[in-house]
Image (spheres, grey):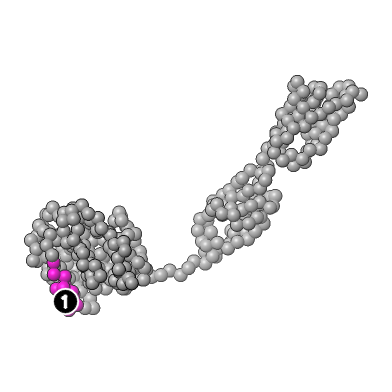
Amino acid sequence: MKRTVALLALGMLAYAEPQVSPQRIIVNPVPTDLQVRVWVDRDPGKSGNPTYQNGEAISIGVQVNQDAYVYLLSIDAGGEINPILPNPFDEDNFLRGGETRRFPPTGARYTYTVSGPNGQNRVLAVASKRRLDMGRVLDVANDYQPRVQGEQLGRVMAIVVDPVPDRDWTSDVAFFVVGRAQPAPRAGTLVIDTDPQGAQVLLDGRSIGTTPMRIAVNPGRYRLEFVLDGYERSGLTLSVDPGETVHVERELKPIASVLEFYSNVETIVYVDGREAGRTKKGYLRLRLSPGEHQVVALAPGYEAFVANVRLRGNQTLQANLNRL
């Protein structure tokens, strides 16, 4: 069964004494070749200050450039210090040079869960070439509960590092915020219609029905597309705010169909009462919109040819004109 280790993270600076800076507390003033890097799973590049809610799982990444013992401490927004590695479920805190490790590791018997007051939090990693007495850190930290002030935290850290030569330890810090859970946003509404109606509607690539239609959606940005046989596929991108009703009306453009017209004599061809062209060697290619059309072919000395056609895609029409 997995156990949960509460992560009461690194936020002691909210109550720190002005004369004690976080850099003085966690940075070794003596140059050292030993390096450690720590980060949280939502900010592996350490470029931001990600937010977690109380009760959410969190994992921590650590990397060292030399063999070292790594100790992880969390300091929450109220200044409370909690060692989180090693812990009763994982005492293996030794890393080889160049090794990257994630805590909790895969298959661990425990998890890290965010807990504590809202605000700025930190995870502090201390890497040492020698083992440190973390029990003494706990004792001193508990003496100063509920909050560890800046100078007091400095003394806590001094207990950690004093027994180790300056060049044999170093530290790094990862930041994150514990925030309040936000209420679920109110849904918005899409009212959708097309001309002609009956078009299939795709919302972010997923079919949601045919026009006309009305649908509730979560606030956000969406891609709408319309599909109807005989008409060009079209779409648009829109945003819906909480509680907003967005009306979408779309006129669909017919896909041009090709009518290949053949005749036994040279003719003038009319489509829907308008001249559309003249045959050449008994052939004329016409691009027309889908739907019903009347085609009339005239040639001197021949009876008129009249045909009603319904175009859906490409078609051919053969006209045989009879002499008068």
Q: Is 138 included in the stretch rendered in magenta?
A: yes
In the rendered image, the vertical position of residue 91 relative to residue 212, given as above or below: below
Q: Amino acid at mark 1?
A: Asp
Residue 70 in magenta?
A: no
Above or below, comparing residue 275 to residue 69 in the picture: above
Quadrant location of the C terminus? Answer: top right
**Closer to the camera, 146 or 242?**
146
The image shows residue 179 at horizontal and vertical percentages of 36, 68
Residue 153: x, y in percent?
Answer: 17, 71
Do we see residue 277 in this rendering?
no
**The residue positioned farthest toward the right in the image shown:** 324
Secondary structure category for the residue under label 1: helix
Task: Classify residue 313 by image quadrant.
Answer: top right
> Is 142 or 110 nearer to us in this picture?
110
Relative to 293, residue 173 above or below: below
Residue found at x 34% / y 59%: 42
Residue 232 is left or right of residue 11, and the answer is right
Give above or below for 187 relative to 34.
below
Q: Is residue 12 left or right of residue 113?
A: left
Q: What residue is shown with label 1?
A: 139
Quadrant of the rendering where the N terminus is positioned: bottom left
x, y percent for residue 44 = 31, 56
**Viewer-closest of 168 and 117:** 168
Q: Residues within 10 Å of mark 1 (few under 14, many from 20)?
A: few
**Residue 261 seen in render:** yes
User: On the image, which quarter does residue 262 sit in?
Assistant: top right
Q: Which residue sits at x=7%, y=61%?
A: 165
Q: Position of residue 65 (x, y in %)?
A: 18, 53
Question: Range of the magenta residues?
Answer: 132-143
